[in-house]
Image (spheres, rainbow, N blue to C red):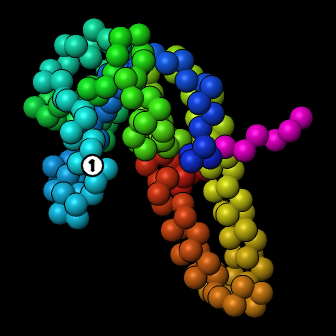
C-alpha cells in the first residue's frame, strides 16, 4: 500500500462535501491588535478578508446553522482564554450561496483554497477533511517524535553539554534548534509527543 503524504499546502479538494459551513461559519481568529498590525503593513489579504466577510452580531444564526460547531469553537476559545462574548466569533462570506455553493468559486481567494488552514483547525462535525486532518496531525507528531529521538540519541552519546562532531554543534545547540521546530505545536501537545 502506498504511503500517503499529507501537507497543509495541498488539500485534496475532492474531500470537500460542499456544505458551505467554511463560508457561512468562518471563525474570526484575529484580535484587534493583530488586525492593526495587518493594516499597518498593508496586508492585502486581510483587507480582502475584511471586505468579504461580515460578522454575525450574535451566536443566534450560527447556532441555527451548526450548533455543535458553535459549541466546539466557543469551548476551545474559552479554554484558551480568548473568548469575548462582546466580539463576533463567526462570519459569513458575501459570496456564499445557498446549498454550500460559492458565487466566485473559480476565482476564490487564496484563504479559501487553504481551508482548513492547518492540522488543528476546528472543523464542523462531519467535515470531509477530518481524515486528511488526522493524517496530517499524525505525520507532524511522527516528525516531532523523530526529532526527539535524534536528540535523545545525541544526549546519550555526547552528554547534555557535549559536542557533536558530525553536526559541528553542541547538543544544546541541537536541542535549541529542535525546540524551535516543536514549539509552534506546543498548544497542541508537542512537548508530550
From the viewer's side, name the closer residue of 94 and 60: 94
Q: Quadrant of residue 16?
A: top right
* Image coordinates for residue 130, horizontal then vertical, percent: 57, 27
Give the position of the N terminus as an image quadrant: top right
Q: With 28 as the anchor, is 33 left or right in this view?
A: left
From the viewer's side, name the closer residue of 52 and 119: 52
Secondary structure under badge 1? Answer: helix
Note whether 148 is above or below 140 in the view shown: below
Please name the predominant secondary structure of the magenta segment in the image: loop
* Image coordinates for residue 179, horizontal then vertical, percent: 53, 67
- What span is colored magenta in the figure? 1-6
Res 72 seen here: no
Q: With 21 as the anchor, is 185 left or right in this view?
A: right
Magenta stretch: includes residue 153: no
Question: Exactly how many numbered labels are in the figure?
Answer: 1
From the viewer's side, name the closer residue of 166 and 116: 116
Res 106 seen here: yes
Note whether 99 is above or below 3 in the view shown: above
Q: Quadrant of residue 21?
A: top left
Rate crowding at label 1 as few (under 14), some (14 to 19) or many (20 or more) other CA atoms within 10 Å.
some
- Residue at the image position 20 percent from the left and 52 percent from the top: 35
* Image coordinates for residue 148, horizontal then vertical, percent: 66, 63
- Residue at the image position 63 percent from the left and 56 percent from the top: 144
- Residue at the image position 52 percent from the left and 21 percent from the top: 127
Note whether 154 is above or below 183 in the view shown: below
Q: With 158 as the anchor, is 104 left or right in this view?
A: left
Note whether 115 is above or below 25 in the view shown: below
- Residue at the image position 28 percent from the left and 54 percent from the top: 44
As drawn, the residue found furthest toward the right would be 1
Q: Quadrant of residue 173?
A: bottom right
* Image coordinates for residue 153, horizontal then vertical, percent: 76, 71
Q: Which residue is mark 1?
A: 46
Amino acid at each position: 500500500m502506498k504511503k500517503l503524504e499529507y501537507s497543509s499546502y495541498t488539500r485534496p479538494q475532492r474531500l470537500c462535501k460542499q456544505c458551505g459551513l467554511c463560508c457561512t461559519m468562518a471563525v474570526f481568529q484575529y484580535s484587534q491588535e493583530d488586525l492593526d498590525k495587518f493594516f499597518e503593513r498593508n496586508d492585502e489579504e486581510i483587507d480582502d478578508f475584511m471586505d468579504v466577510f461580515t460578522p454575525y452580531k450574535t451566536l443566534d444564526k450560527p447556532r441555527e446553522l451548526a450548533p455543535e460547531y458553535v459549541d466546539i469553537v466557543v469551548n476551545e476559545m474559552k479554554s484558551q482564554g480568548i473568548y469575548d462574548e462582546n466580539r463576533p466569533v463567526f462570519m459569513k462570506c458575501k459570496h456564499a450561496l445557498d446549498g454550500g455553493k460559492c458565487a466566485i468559486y473559480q476565482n476564490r481567494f487564496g484563504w479559501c483554497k487553504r481551508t482548513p488552514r492547518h492540522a488543528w483547525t476546528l472543523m464542523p462535525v462531519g467535515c470531509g477533511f477530518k481524515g486528511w486532518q488526522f493524517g496530517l496531525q499524525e505525520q507532524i507528531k511522527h516528525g516531532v517524535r523523530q526529532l526527539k529521538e535524534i536528540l535523545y540519541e545525541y544526549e546519550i552519546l555526547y552528554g547534555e553539554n557535549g559536542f557533536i562532531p558530525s553536526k559541528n554543534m553542541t547538543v544544546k545547540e541541537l536541542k535549541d534548534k529542535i525546540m524551535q521546530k516543536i514549539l509552534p505545536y506546543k498548544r497542541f501537545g508537542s512537548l508530550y509527543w
